[in-house]
Amino acid sequence: MRFTRTALAATSIAASALLLAGCSGGSSQSSDSANGKTTLTITVWNYKQTPEFKALFDAFEKANPKITIKPVDILAQNYEDKITAMLSGGDSTDIITVKNLTDFGGYVSKKQFQPVDDVAKKLPADKIPALADYKADGHYYATPYRQDFGVLFYNKTMFKDAGLPDPANLTWQEFAQDAKKLTHGTKGKKVYGAYIHTWNSMVQGYASAQAGRSLNKPPYNYLSTQYKTILGMQKAGTIMKWGVANSQQVSYQTELETGKAAMVPMGTWLIAPLLADEASGATKIDWGIAPVPQLSAGSPITTDGGPTGFGINKNAKDTAAAKKFLAFAAGPEGAKAVASIGIVPAYHSDAITDEYFGLKGMPQDDISKKAFNPDVIKPDGPTGARAAAVNNVLNQEHQLIMTGNKSISAGIAEMNKRVKQEVLDQ
Amino acid sequence: MTTTADRPTRTGPSRTSKARASRLRRRNTLVGWSFILPNFIGFALFTLVPVIAALLLSFMRWDAYNPPTWAGLKNFQRLLGDDSFWTALRNTALFAVGHVPLTLAISLGLALLLNQKLRGIAFFRVAVFFPYITTLVAVAIVWNMMFDPSSGPVNQFLGMLGVAHPPGWTSSTAWALPAVIITSVWKDMGYYMVIFLAGLQAIPEEYYEAASMDGAGWWNKFWNVTLPSLRPTTFLVLVLLSVQSFKIFDLIIVMTEGGPGQATTVLSQLIYQQGILQGNFGYSSAIAMVLFLIILLVTVFQFKIQQRRER
């Protein structure tokens, strides 16, 4: 009896010790220098559903046979949280994919990335406008491979049916008028002239870019013009109400593809899924892209957008190989690889544009080509170390204004007050 | 002499037996501990250490990456002047005030209703329990659509009843929280109903027979037999519900994300926002400490009341 008890106690202690050992283990060695081959680890999201990563990695491995890339796949919805946890735990993945400028501000302020000035300086800055977005305190901390920006997706057939000319160069006022002419039907069969998605950037991003202002700090009074336009459309019933779009979790892609809305201002990331759905027969609409409507007529085409890029982890195992990859992804070869699957690369050139418009199903008209080369691309949200906190306030007040719980002026006054009190003063 | 000779024989055995007893007790304690150990190590590693770390962090500034710096009481000072914190605190309290009594009453009512010997009663019990085993995300998304202000079934039904201006539910700052409460009551009632059912079935039939002999009607039986006998169950449900209400997070994240504006932002969501999303782990730990204190106080208060009643 005594023996069994002691034995039991011993086993339970041993078991818990094993448990503990299991917790502390698990560090992995990524580089394998024995046969001159290097493995580069890169964080990605939804690897299977995001073909740009594979396209880019395959092209790089082909050009650098001695380097193999091992993607670290993370669920897109948890990407930011997971990266935070990984980096805090001293993770040594070589390259971190930077999803947006808001996250970028966080990485830089926490000093989690190595400066990559040497890579950036060798790149043709005039052909990669988004490169400048990754400069902080005089240093580059990442390089872009992809740059999306807002364009106006529209249904060509619906414009023809309404007897309207294609929306070549609209102002927001004209956009609202066109939307009115394109709206018809009632109840379940209602077709809206336009669809404005629920994100705060859909109003605030364009407004700040076209007013030449930044969303980083108050005053935000310049936003009121754009809010008046969009709320006016909501009231006129030419766009779906924010509350409805939000509670039904409406998909902007479906609104366009099923012909429920004639115009959808959205990022160029929508092009690739549209092409895919066209190829598979999931949608049959005749679509095109146009420059996003402007604040005033005759101004240079100004839109908002943001780069996606790569940064090198401070704890990276192989910095040299990582830098090689960054240069490749940001340059013409990387651009060719991503453009071939319908992703807008950060590197601009006529050759790349031709490659892009050579994709099966791409609209071939001049308006679409013009829309693809806007004059100015500004960030679509706040940037810098406090970006996430500022955006949180802007988004909350956006919801209140769009649902009519607050007037435009009260909402903007609250933005001015809260961003200062809750973020900038802390 | 005899007395001196007697003494050791009298005290001897008792002393050794005392020593043996204490050795046995010690060994039993050790064996007991060793049985608890695996569980305790898990608890210590994943609960106790993080809790203590959070307590320390609430006095620091930390971005989860660079070394933390001492901040003293600054995080708590910031709390006092932070409107978002007070809004979240108010929303959390309102949620609890709505969710706890409603769920308690409805699940008790359902338990009474379904505690009958009836053909097919099992089916109805399962039907009521079903929401509890449904994935929360699915529940939140479907209810969100039901609450759609213009074409949702809830407002269409209200319109049929003749309500001219039905509420805007999740797009209205006044009605978003009630919408979340209704959803969570619907989801949780089945679970607590099962606990109440178990409690009801443990009440001896003789009590009711005796009450009938005394001429008690349905209401008297319920008030004087059922409720007092259910007191331990009610207490358990009350504590579980309160803790759950103050910790509410998942449903709100999926259903409203705290919006519109901050109309449904609760404390646990603010903790997540400040810590994970914005990298202010010190400040978020300070909020977590406040939430911890509130839950602790509420639970201790409930225990005190229960103890007094039992006496």
Image (cartoon, rainbow, N blue to C red):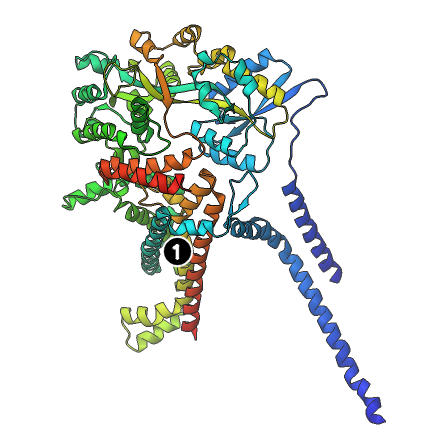
Label 1 sits on a secondary structure element that is helix
Residue displayed at 31% across by 24% down: A206
> Is residue B194 placed above or below A330 in the rendered structure?
below
| Of B74 and A165, the residue lying toward us | B74
Q: How many marks?
A: 1
Residue A200 lies left or right of residue A58; in this view the side is left
Q: Is residue B35 left or right of residue B7?
A: left
Q: Quadrant of residue B294?
A: bottom left
- Picture coordinates of residue B102, whole percent (x, y): 31, 56
As drawn, A253 above or below B206: above
Say which residue label 1 marks: B192
Q: Is residue B259 above or below residue A93?
A: below
Can residue B201 be seen from the camera position used here? Answer: no
Residue drawn at x 52%, y 19% as measured from the top left: A54
Q: Viewed as shown, does residue A194 lie left or right of B10?
A: left
Residue B90 percent location from the top left of the image: 33, 52
**Viewer-closest of B274 and B297:** B274
Three-letter amino acid code at disc 1?
A: Tyr
